[in-house]
Amino acid sequence: MEFSTDKFLFGGDYNPEQWLDRPDILEEDVRMMVKAGVNVVSLGIFSWAEEEPEEGRFELDWLADIIHNLYDNGIYTILATPSGARPRWLAEKYPEVLRVNESRQKLIFGERHNHCLTSEKYRENVAIIDKKLAERFGKDPAVILWHISNEFGGECHCPSCQAAFRKYIQDKYQTVDKLNASWWTKFWSHNYTSFDQVESPSPIGESSIQGLTLDWKRFVSDTTIDFMNKEVEALRAGGAEQPVTTNMMHDYDGINYGKMGQSLDVISWDSYPTWQDDTKVKIMENYSMTHDFMRCIKDKPFLMMESCTTGTNWQPYSDLKAPGQYTNEAMNAIAHGSESVQIFQIRQGRGSTEKLHGALIDHYGKDDTRVYKECEKLGNSLKDLKELLNTNVDSKIALIYDVENKWAAEGSDGPRNEGLPLRETAFKLYHALCRYGVNCDVIDEDHDISKYKILILPMIYSMRNGLEEKIKTFVENGGTLVMTYWTGITDENDLVHLGGFPHDLCDVAGLRSEEIDSRPDEHENYFVPVSGNELGLTNIWKCTKLFDLVRLTTAVPLMTYGEDFYNGKAALSVNAYGKGKTYYISADGEDGFFTEIMSKICMASGIMPYLDEMPENIVVSERRNDHATYLFIQNFGDHAEDIYLSETYSEIYPARSDEKFSGKLTIPRMGTVILKK
Ligand code: GLA
Ligand code: ZN
């Protein structure tokens, strides 16, 4: 089913069930939402206890009243299935719905997102309430989308999950011999003689068989997706006709989101930049990398399902967002393909853990707060940006960031157990492209790569499904490949490849990785340019953490190490292969290194930046369709920045004018300008 909208969605998670005894507040909420330009809310995410106060007794009239009152006021509903948290009666009557943790401790009732994924009783009860909701609201024009559960995640190690895991493993390997070979179990005499002996990994049991850990993660991910699919089936059985989504999370690695996305009609996710961790511009880039990842699941616009107007309650410090900062964060989501700006939460609840989490409406309850006024301006300005709907980001560059690779690489012991810089390396390369000023797709290993000019493989330790073949064809046909150390090491069972690394890509890279040195963070070596190198590199840059020692066959060195026993060995090289080229980066480097080489590699591949110069607090992104290109220029610094436009544009945000201009443009502090070409 397709999801499409004729307006930018603006609204967020709304919990009226907490205020049913305060009709005055519910009424004021609607007035304030309408005034702020809210056109959709997510309802019922944690309302199971109100919807089914005791087993088999359903109370949905209150929900229908809320939904229809909102609809009468121009506000649609994204209706949730309530499986993210269960009512007390359910856990009391069917204790098996609660989880057992990896240390085999049975959990007691409390918290949320803690149900057993395989429990038949849980699945049954979820299906009953989901079907009821669908029967009541499945054809209701007020409901435009289903929000399946909430932030699926976590795992359960109960007897039911063990049995399901055994079956999963048996179906996959068929014979115990195949299992033993795939998991390399002769190591420490851990051979299985029966599938009945298979147990999930545990700190009090097995944690040394890395093939087991990897398959367990696959099982948890597949089981979660299956659980979600059963929820969708229940909605359909109840007659629901609307599309479905579930809200995903930033860099969450418990689920293969690429696979999960196949069951969804639109991708949505919850974006909570942790602003205090770095400079604003770098934090925004880190989250735009996730926006790009989410967009690439379907190569389509997505929804930002949650975000926070100001401080949250769960970060180490709840830092307020400065004036303009939330608007800029929201515009960045749109710049990377979002068709919504959804807030968690519309109104703060009075008690429990999220009472101090930022919202549209705070405890004071009126519409003259700094935060409300900024949201009101944002919400109303989105009404003028309709022409951006259905435009997409058209990137010539892709970077592979794959969760199964992450499971395998991070689950492996050595060469670096203190912080394997996997996300970090991917982000450094992504950041380098942001600094150059072009978009980059973030894709998994299963994604098509044929349309790109540059493909980046940051630490793709484990490759599956014939990725090597796709890559060879890509380079043969003229693509530029950029690969780093620690790529092509193991197969999909985490068995190390024989015959040299990067497996099957040694001729594409023109080298063989012979050894890899791993040192503490403080240890430094240097990238030293080879004189006359074809990229024209002249700077010396620091390198740290991991140092690949490669033997070049056909590749040519562009930089060499400056120190240690591998002083003079290639640290960056290039190899011509077919009609294309491969650059091989042997070590982790400082930002300046990645920024310099990526800008030169882009230029060498004919990819020009959107702006001739990129001030350090500026980020840019393009959305386009067949008729127009929209350039978002955003300033995440605290002073205005001048940029220079070499092409002619008109402005559509914050001001709208048909006047065409080029040359100097000032982007205000914490401001966004959207230009049209
Ligand atoms: C998540 C959840 C919400 C809420 C917010 C708070 O994204 O989905 O229910 O807890 O975090 O930031
Ligand atoms: Zn379980």
Image (tube, rainbow, N blue to C red):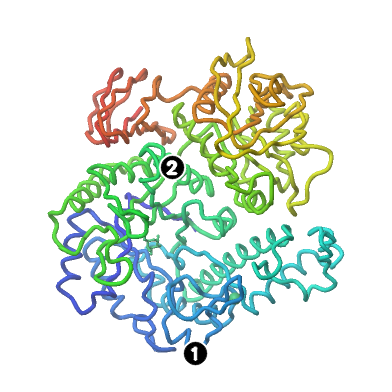
Ligand 1 is found in the corner quadrant, namely: bottom left
Q: Amino acid at mark 2?
A: Ser
Q: Which residue is mark 1?
A: 93
Give the number of the disc on residue 179.
Answer: none
Q: Mark 2 and 1 residues: CB-CB less than 8 Å, in contact?
A: no
Residue 594 to residue 401: above or below: above
Q: Is mark 1 within 8 Å of ligand 2?
A: no
* Residue 27 screen position, x and y as percent: 17, 69
Residue 188 to residue 160: above or below: above
Q: Nearer the viewer, residue 390 or 485?
A: 485
* Residue 545 screen position, x and y as percent: 60, 37
* Residue 254 screen position, x and y as percent: 56, 59
Q: Is residue 604 left or right of residue 267?
A: right
The span from disc 2 to disc 1 (Cα, nearest Å) is 44 Å
- Local SS, label 1: helix
Residue in the picture at 63% in, 21% down: 562
Residue 104 placement: quadrant: bottom right
Q: Earlier in the sequence, mark 2 or mark 1?
A: 1
Q: Amino acid at mark 1?
A: Lys
Q: Nearer the viewer, residue 123 or 71?
A: 123
Give the number of the disc on residue 288.
Answer: 2
- Local SS, label 2: helix
